[in-house]
Image (cartoon, rainbow, N blue to C red):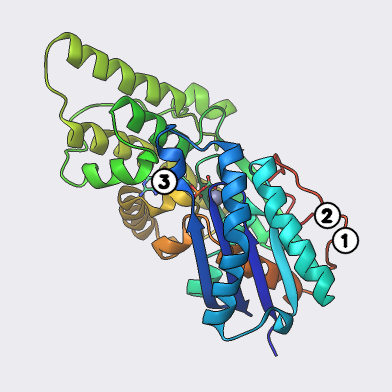
């Protein structure tokens, strides 16, 4: 019988609780506190922690009811123990420990970033091994070599300044759009011209590639957008928001896909997995599909709901760890807000 795993996610502003059996998603309950943060233009950690505290038990009850299971049916409890906001992580870890201790079930503290990469197991089955993975979220942008999602991840490159999602959110703010900016820019870009404005592609010059082959940089792009907006204002030209959104999205997607495909080719790997909140972006999904098809690389992208934060991906990763018979975490499990991507389990 495949293991029934309870997954708990609370690293940022989503409280997620899910039940996964083997590689199959049974239920996925998510409560978001994003509306509470919108007026501040970004996530307020203390507000997020309190919202997790209020939502955790209702989400557990909802997930259990929808799965037709009680908590005592689970074979293991998996929880995001890092990286993320310290106080927010603590709520999830405390809840997971309480369940594991009360019901005498093994506890697995897992990495949020590895969980993003693992989410697609629920849509497309076990990850091919090895695979190159591109992880693009609000706080991270990493290019990874994944030999085994449960135990063997090597970082090939990462952002040296802003994460891709952070760039979307900051540019949205400059354009006067509400938080979180990623979905807003995505929506606007649909009717824009991606070639209207030539925004820079960070770390793609020959000289930069020597030192930063698989690294990313988005702060120069953000500055270029700010400068463009200021120049238009100075010259009294009304902003064409769809064109700015499309040209910006094109610049982000271009660099992400170019470097990910280069990594596949240089490592001789024909699989690319993408995951994380920014993977919900239409531009990125379309460009990745087109370029992977042209390069003969098999692309895996999860459904949009599994791209942003959720408990399902945490349960999915927990299930991989359980299926490989790896040892559980101990009940003195802590949180690590800057847990490195290579450390899959704490
Ligand atoms: O993975 P995630 O849900 O949370 C973190 O672990 O950070 O990613 C959130 C990020 C935010 O920056 C948000 O603006 C971005 O993902 N995002 C998007 C889209 N949906 C969410 N960015 C671009 N296009 C989208 N459709
Ligand atoms: Zn995330």
Q: Which residue is mark 2?
A: 333
Residue 301 in view here: no
Image coords of residue 150 (percent x, y): 71, 63
Mark 3, residue position: 35
Horizontal arrangement in the rendering, residue 138 relative to residue 130 (left or right) = left
The quadrant of the picture occupied by the N terminus is: bottom right
Please report contact status of discs 2 and 1: CB closer than 8 Å, yes or no.
yes
Query: Considering the numbered disc 1 on the image, is that residue within a helix, a strand or a loop?
Result: loop
Question: What percent of the width, then of the height, locates residue 208?
Answer: 51, 24
According to the picture, the residue beneath numbered tag 1 turns out to be 330
Regarding mark 3 in the picture, which secondary structure is present there? helix
In the rendered structure, the answer to whether residue 104 lies left or right of residue 252 reads right
Residue in the image at 31% along x and 52% along y: 282
Query: Above or below — where is 79 with respect to 193?
Result: below
* Quadrant assignment for the C terminus: bottom right
Residue depicted at 84% across the width and 61% down the height: 329
């Amino acid at each position: 019988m495949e293991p029934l795993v309870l997954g708990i996610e609370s690293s940022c502003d989503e409280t997620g609780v899910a039940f996964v059996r083997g590689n199959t998603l049974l239920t996925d309950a998510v409560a978001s506190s994003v509306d509470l943060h919108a007026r501040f233009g970004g996530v307020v950690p203390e507000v997020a922690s309190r919202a997790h505290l209020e939502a955790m038990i209702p989400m557990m009850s909802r997930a259990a009811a929808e799965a037709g299971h009680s908590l005592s049916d689970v074979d293991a409890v998996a929880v995001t123990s890092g990286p993320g906001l310290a106080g927010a992580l603590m709520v999830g870890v405390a809840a997971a420990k309480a369940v594991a201790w009360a019901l005498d079930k093994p506890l697995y503290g897992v990495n949020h970033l590895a969980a993003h990469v693992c989410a697609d197991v629920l849509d497309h089955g076990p990850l091919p091994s090895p695979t190159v993975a591109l992880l693009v979220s609000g706080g991270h942008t990493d290019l990874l070599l994944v030999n085994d999602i449960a135990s063997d991840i090597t970082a090939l490159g990462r952002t040296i300044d802003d994460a891709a999602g952070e760039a979307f959110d900051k540019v949205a703010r400059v354009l006067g759009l509400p938080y979180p900016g990623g979905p807003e820019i995505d929506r606007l870009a649909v009717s824009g011209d991606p070639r209207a404005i030539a925004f820079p592609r960070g770390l793609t010059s020959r000289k930069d590639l020597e030192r930063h082959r698989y690294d990313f940089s988005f702060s120069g792009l953000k500055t270029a957008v700010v400068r463009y907006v200021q120049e238009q204002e100075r010259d009294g030209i009304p902003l064409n928001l769809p064109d700015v959104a499309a040209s910006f999205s094109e610049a982000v997607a271009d660099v992400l896909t170019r470097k990910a495909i280069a990594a596949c080719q240089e490592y001789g790997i024909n699989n690319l997995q993408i995951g994380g909140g920014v993977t919900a972006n239409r531009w990125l999904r379309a460009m990745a599909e087109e370029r992977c098809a042209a390069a003969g690389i098999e692309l895996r992208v999860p459904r949009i709901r599994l791209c942003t934060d959720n408990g399902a991906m945490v349960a999915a990763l927990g299930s991989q760890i359980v299926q490989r018979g790896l040892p559980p975490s101990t009940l003195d499990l802590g949180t690590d807000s800057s847990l490195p991507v290579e450390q899959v389990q704490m």
